[in-house]
Image: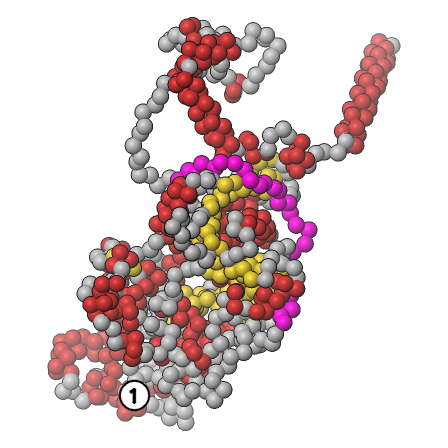
Amino acid sequence: MKRGVLHAGSYVSRTRLFRDVAEFSSVVSRKQVALMDTPKPTLAEKLKSSSQALIASSELVINRAQAKSTEVLRTLASTAASPLLHELEDQNVSLGRKLEDWKDDWGPDTLTPKDTAIQQSPDTLAPKDTPIRQKPPHQDLIPKKKRKKTSSSAPSVVSVSAIKREGLIDPLKKPVLQDLTPTSQHKPIAVLAHGLDRVLFNPGVHWLQDPRSRVYNFSPHLENIPKVTDFAFERLAGFISSSRDEDLRTLAKRENRMFAGSTSSLTGLLGHCYFLISGHKTVDISCLSKSFYHEDKNFTPGQRMPTSVLFNYKDGVYAIDSDSEDSSKNVLTWLGTLLEKFLTMSETEFNMYLRSSPPLKDEGDLMREAYRYAKSDKFVMRSQLDGVDRRLPGTGVFDIKTRACLPIRMDILNWEENSGYVLKSTQGFYESFEREYYDLIRSAFLKYGFQVRIGNMDGVIVAYHNTAKMFGFQYIPLEEMDQRLFGPEPGAGDRVFEKCVTLLECIVPEIVGCFPNQSVKCTFECEENSTELNIFIQPADWTPTEEQTKPPMRQLAIRAQSFLDESPVSGARAITSSAPEPWTLHWTLADVSDDQDTVRKNFEECMERKFRFYNIPSGVSVTDLPKYWSELNFGNAPKQTDLETDDQTQQKDFDYSRFRLVPERRITLLRDLARSGREFTEMMERAEAGKKKIVLGEPYDISDMEIEVYKEEEDRDVHDENEDTGPAQSQDLAPEALLVGNKPNDLASFSPNDDGSSATAGSIDLSRIDELDQEPDR
């Protein structure tokens, strides 16, 4: 009975408990439903309903507000200090205490709340014994001494006057680019020649010639690169800039797009937009060997260099051209065009474009190259299509990139001597494919990725060379470049490209609006570790006047803040995030200053960061430098009139400030490596002189390989005998004596002929006997 009573009482208590829990859950459910029925304000609605702009919480506006407050306080202090002090005393500014009550000691902690019901996190409270010392309110009234500026690697801070525009960039529901049909006929897209299509379907580096077996994986025709001066570039159609591309302008007008550009002019702008959005995110080099564990993971200075473009205005359309310096004296500019034909044409067809061949009857194939045209909300973009293989995913289109070795890129004018630099291994810090791949990640992958996406391509095939010889090839799909730049998260590259293009579309109307209905020059720079993208704009065509000798200039500063599900995060976090929350970008645009002197000073500092020295090549003296520079011409045949120039006039007008008269230590090191590499190449050429080149996949005669197998004891005896007699005595011996101890019949077991008979000593080339392997086969 007692057990039954207890059981019944327990049952009643649990019943009441369950009923109370059910009623409480019902109330909670009704409140949750009410909250769900109430629409949650979006980030844009919060921005509109807020009394202050969303950017008001950013460092930009905080610094501006503090600077303005300090300026007001100092002005009042200089005019009427006493009233200001009384006002500060009455309002208990900043500390809640009177000025005369200020003491140098800490004093009692009067700010501690007495209400014990108020709970605070222990992480946000300092210990009771260590009160926080505050700055006295009258210190702001004391003028501070000006400090001398010290040189620092930190980016310059720009004072922004007022926010001009701001907005939100939400994820797009459609692709950022849509295809357009060209208005004129183009050439068909080229295909790879010489069996290079194997590279597209096998990851990693493919040696042109295997360094161990000396067997060629591809045609030996590709080994020696023709000289740039021997190629007739005038027989090609040539590059067409955006402003001269009538198809591009026609499509822009037809699609009601205000801006048009090509990959060569847009990728630099998109790159600086990425630096701003990502917060200078580093690259991933974890795939490399331990030689690069402690190497720099930031982008190279060349990749971060300020980018200048021209907005060419005509009939309501701005065609964007690159405004870089003259590239006619850069051998790599011309060599890239040459090698594209070299890799996609047969030997006979390529030789037709050499100056040694007679001119073509039709004066060359002047039909336009193959392009892809695409449109976004405000742009029409163009990308040249270098190669295609329908077996690749997607469109099957890929880009052809020619990559010169490290010394060539670092010391461009000394390219002839530096062409001795060789790639000897797959891995290693110098003279390896791995070093070239490491430099590609930091200096080229970002540009390659933008170009591939504008052209709707699958990837790029890279040809590694030293301007004289080809070393190998590698196909790098777009997914691999994305992993190195943005991380392993799928789709990160597409999201980055979408944000960069959309941000650029928000910026360009403000750029051309500075000087409407005319062509303008523009320079983009997001300095390393800076939170601003600075843009300098000036008219492209300007006639000086007495009142104003220099063209007017404007400077715009752009800032950006990423949000994941309306929570502010860093740009790197937004890029690498695998969360399903949408990525929203809030951007602001502001004028920096109305003072022309300030803007021009900032622009000059920007151009100083863009400047790069040339190193005087070996064998060229300072006196001969003006003549060397004037005669440097790769694109056209040398003209007699160009060579006949007064030396005194050249030296008088020559700008020596562009050249470094004494090369840096690292340049000297690279030149030493190039010289030693040339000696290595010459040694290998002597060793292989007269040998038949064996190509993988082609038939060969085994008798041509000169592979001889020696018995272990006899081989060791011959080796010791040659060392004892010396080279002078061995020359007097009969050929048979140089082989296997005067036993020519022993050669019968070495290499059979095609008819099944045995090879004799007379069938072997004895002139290269010293090259035979002296170590027995174990």
Q: Does the stretch in magenta take in 763?
A: no
Viewer-nearest residue: 708 or 457: 457
The residue that disc 1 covers is 764
Query: Does residue 145 appear in this view?
Result: yes
Quarter of the image with the N terminus in it: top right
Is residue 170 magenta-colored?
yes
* Residue 138 picture location, percent across and down: 40, 14
Residue 699 appears in view = no
Q: Nearer the viewer, residue 394 or 561?
A: 561
The x, y position of residue 177, in whole percent, is: 62, 58
Q: Position of residue 36 (x, y in %)?
A: 77, 32
Q: Main secondary structure of the magenta part?
A: loop
Instruction: Kindly identify the amino acid type of the residue bearing the numbered disc 1.
Output: Ile
Note whether 755 is above or below 668 in the view shown: below
Report the side of 11 relative to 243 (left or right): right
Figure colour scheme: secondary structure
Up-down: is 44 above or below 268?
Answer: above
Residue 488: give x, y in percent of width and height: 54, 50
Front residue of this view, candidates 542 and 319: 542
Magenta region, residue range: 156-183
Q: Quadrant of residue 224?
A: bottom left
Query: Residue at position x 22%, y 64% from top?
Result: 651
Residues 247 and 685: in front is: 247
> Which residue is drawn at the image coordinates 35% and 21% (left, top)?
143
The residue depicted at 26 percent of the width and 56 percent of the height is: 657
